[in-house]
Amino acid sequence: GPRRARRARRRRGITMLAADSHAIVAPAARAHLMGCLQQKPTLCGRARGQACTSPMIPTIRLASSDDAASLAELAARTFRDTFGADNRPEDLALHLASSYGPLQQARELADPGIITLVAEAEGSLVAFAQLRRGAPPAAVVGPAPIELWRFYLASDWHGRGLAQRLMARVVNEARSAGAATLWLGVWERNPRAIAFYRKAGYAEVGTHVFVVGRDPQTDRIMTRALAGMGAA
């Protein structure tokens, strides 16, 4: 019924937005925030006398080697939440086993060709993005390209502005790395992610194959020029 459909939508969300695939404050949080702005601290909250606290604002930072285990858990969870319903269990299991784990993410964090950003709230990782240097597909013709390899948010953080903040930091890090073109691959069956990227300034330039387990799937290649653009 409608309630079950709503739960399913919340589970899937747009967690995966980049090649590894795939912002309104929630009503309760918005009401609490308005109370914080309009009331004295002693009158804000669920009960009289409870201090008013602002909604959590995640900190976005470069990842370190200490993040390997937490990053592996978040990456596997968000991929499973986003694509589990659309892939065969055996293909999903193969992909998760080959792509995510503390040792795998530790190798990525130590790789000078990979830039990893994480968003942290109250000591837990809630989102991450990875830029990767390397030869792009033929469809990417812009100068000095760098790949937005992965871009994930935990489902609880969809629709709260974090994706836009993380994308802005991605753009800044890409510029700092000397890139003039950002490119990514996004699953052709992920229209919400495609719409997000279009709004962020990306345009479709081609397709390539991305394999999940033993299942070859089609990703749309999208690019965004960085040179000559204002700061995100």
Image: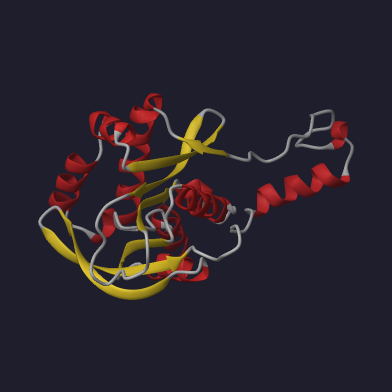
Residue 57's place in the image compared with 207, above or below, is above
Q: Quadrant of residue 98?
A: top left
Q: Quadrant of the N terminus?
A: bottom left
Residue 51 visible in image: yes
Residue at point 77%, 37% (across, down): 45
Residue 126's place in the image compared with 12, above or below, is above
- Measured from the top left, where is residue 180 in percent x and y? 43, 60
Q: Quadrant of the C terminus?
A: bottom right
Residue 1 visible in image: no
- Measured from the top left, where is residue 227 in percent x and y? 50, 64
Residue 1's place in the image compared with 12, above or below, is below
Q: Is residue 132 left or right of residue 126?
A: left
Residue 12's place in the image compared with 194, above or below, is above
Q: Nearer the viewer, residue 52 or 18?
A: 18
Q: Nearer the viewer, residue 204 or 146?
A: 146
Q: Is residue 65 left or right of residue 174?
A: left
Q: Is residue 11 left or right of residue 140?
A: right
Q: Quadrant of residue 139?
A: bottom left
Residue at point 84%, 32% (across, down): 48
Q: Residue furthest top?
A: 66
Residue at point 44%, 67% (across, down): 224
- Measured from the top left, where is residue 52 in percent x and y? 78, 34
Residue at point 43%, 57% (across, down): 13
Q: Nearer the viewer, residue 41 or 111?
A: 111
Q: Residue furthest left?
A: 214
- Colouring of the image: secondary structure
Tell me how many marks there are: 0
